[in-house]
Image (cartoon, rainbow, N blue to C red):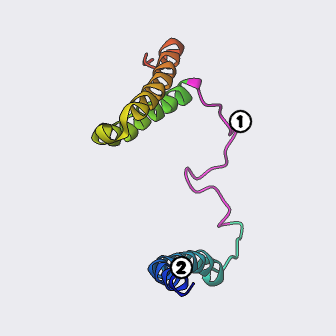
Amino acid sequence: MNFISEQATAISAQYLPILFFIIIAVGLSVVITVIPFILSKSRPDAEKNSPYECGFEGEGIVRNEFDVQFYLVAILFIIFDLEVAFLFPWAVSLKTIGPFGFWSMMVFLTLLTIGFIYEWKRGALEWR
């Protein structure tokens, strides 16, 4: 019984620096987030709230709809970004992960290929 408590103490001592790091990270994040609210002086007036980009009031519809092409290009970027992010570590550890890891990646690449074919059919690769 004494051996188990000594082992638990040794394990908890190993994780103590991680606990300190988490406490410091959370504390620092809270402090950095709260400081601007404490130090800032929020006194908006007509001058501060006036348009500043072009110097005159906007007219007409200010909210424009985005073209679907924008979203298709974003999806295309995510497809290629994910492929590169997962393909390199997979290739490095291919010998150790075995057939299950190989076929898991084949399923993943198949899903990415389906996404790429969808993008192609929707015309995301054609620039207008």
In the rendered image of this protein, does residue 114 appear above or below residue 15?
Answer: above
Residue 70 coordinates in the image, percent (x, y): 53, 29
Q: Nearer the viewer, mark 2 or mark 1?
A: 2
Query: SS for tag 2?
Result: helix
Which quarter of the rendered picture does the C terminus lie within? Answer: top left
Q: Which mark is residue 61?
A: 1
In the rendered image of this protein, does residue 45 appear above or below residue 5?
Answer: above
Q: Kindly give the residue lying farthest to the front in the view shown.
A: 1
Q: Which callout, 2 or 1, points at the residue further toward the start of the chain?
A: 2
Q: Would residue 57 be counted in the magenta stretch?
A: yes
Q: Would residue 51 be counted in the magenta stretch?
A: yes
Residue 34 coordinates in the image, percent (x, y): 63, 78
Q: Are marks 2 and 1 in contact (CB under 8 Å)?
A: no
Main secondary structure along the magenta-highlighted residues: loop
Residue under circle 2?
Answer: 28
In which quadrant of the rendered view does residue 109 lie? top left
